[in-house]
Image (tube, helix red, strand yellow):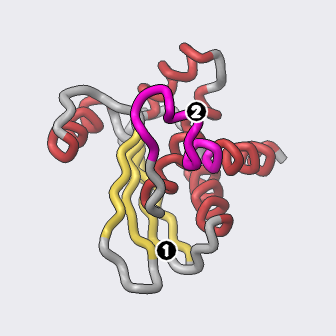
Amino acid sequence: MLKVLVSREPRLAAPPSATISSVVQLVLRAEGVRAATISIALVSNPTIRRLNTRYLSHRRATDVIAFALTGTASAVVGDVYLAPSVARASAAEIGISAREEILRLVVHGVLHVLGYDHPAGAGRTRCVMWRRQELLLARALRRTLQ
């Protein structure tokens, strides 16, 4: 069973919770996951900054933070925190929609929960995780536009 919980702080502009849940389920199914509980929290810049400082020792806002939690041997459990306003700023910089960037970060966070990782710097966009992320994002965008 795939369980997805989506929460958001008040007044945050982001795709509907149903769309986000659908993207999470698409990623889990594509990765062969049959049992999972994933929470996606859409949070403000101050909240993501506090999480980033507390858990990763970076004193700045970031776009997404993911935590793989201890589940059972047969179930994946994880939390993904995403800052829509950071995603909107990144989207504007690279000339894409905020919706696309937010959904990219949903895919990215779920892949981290599943154990994928990437290098920092220039190699990031050439790694296995990035290629998988972009393939799954393309599928998600096609599905959510239908």
Q: Is the stretch drawn in magenta largely helix, strand or loop?
A: helix
- Relative to 87, say whether 95 is above or below: above
- Whole-percent x, y for residue 9 in the image: 36, 42
Give the residue at mark 2: 101
Quarter of the image for the N terminus: give it: bottom right
Give the residue at mark 1: 36
Q: Is residue 103 visible?
A: no
Q: Residue at x 37, y 51 (%)?
A: 66
For the image, the number of numbered tags is: 2
Q: Residue at x 51, y 72 (%)?
A: 3
Q: Which residues are magenta?
A: 118-133
Residue type at mark 1? Ala
- Whole-percent x, y for residue 75 in the image: 45, 80
- Whole-percent x, y for residue 52 in the image: 24, 38
In the image, is residue 123 part of the stretch drawn in magenta? yes
Mark 1 or mark 2: name the one nearer the start of the chain: 1
Q: Residues within 10 Å of mark 2 (few under 14, many from 20)?
A: many
Residue type at mark 2? Glu
**Residue at the bottom extreme, as displayed:** 73
Could you tell whether 97 is left or right of 54 in the image? Answer: right
**Residue at the right extreme, as displayed:** 146
Could you tell whether 125 is left or right of 65 in the image? Answer: right
Q: Residue at x 80, y 45 (%)?
A: 142
- Whole-percent x, y for residue 135 in the image: 71, 47
- Relative to 3, say whether 91 is above or below: above
Label 2 element class: helix
Disc 1 versus disc 2: distance between alpha carbons?
24 Å
Q: Is residue 63 visible?
A: yes
Could you tell whether 14 is left or right of 115 in the image? Answer: right
Q: Which mark is residue 130?
A: none
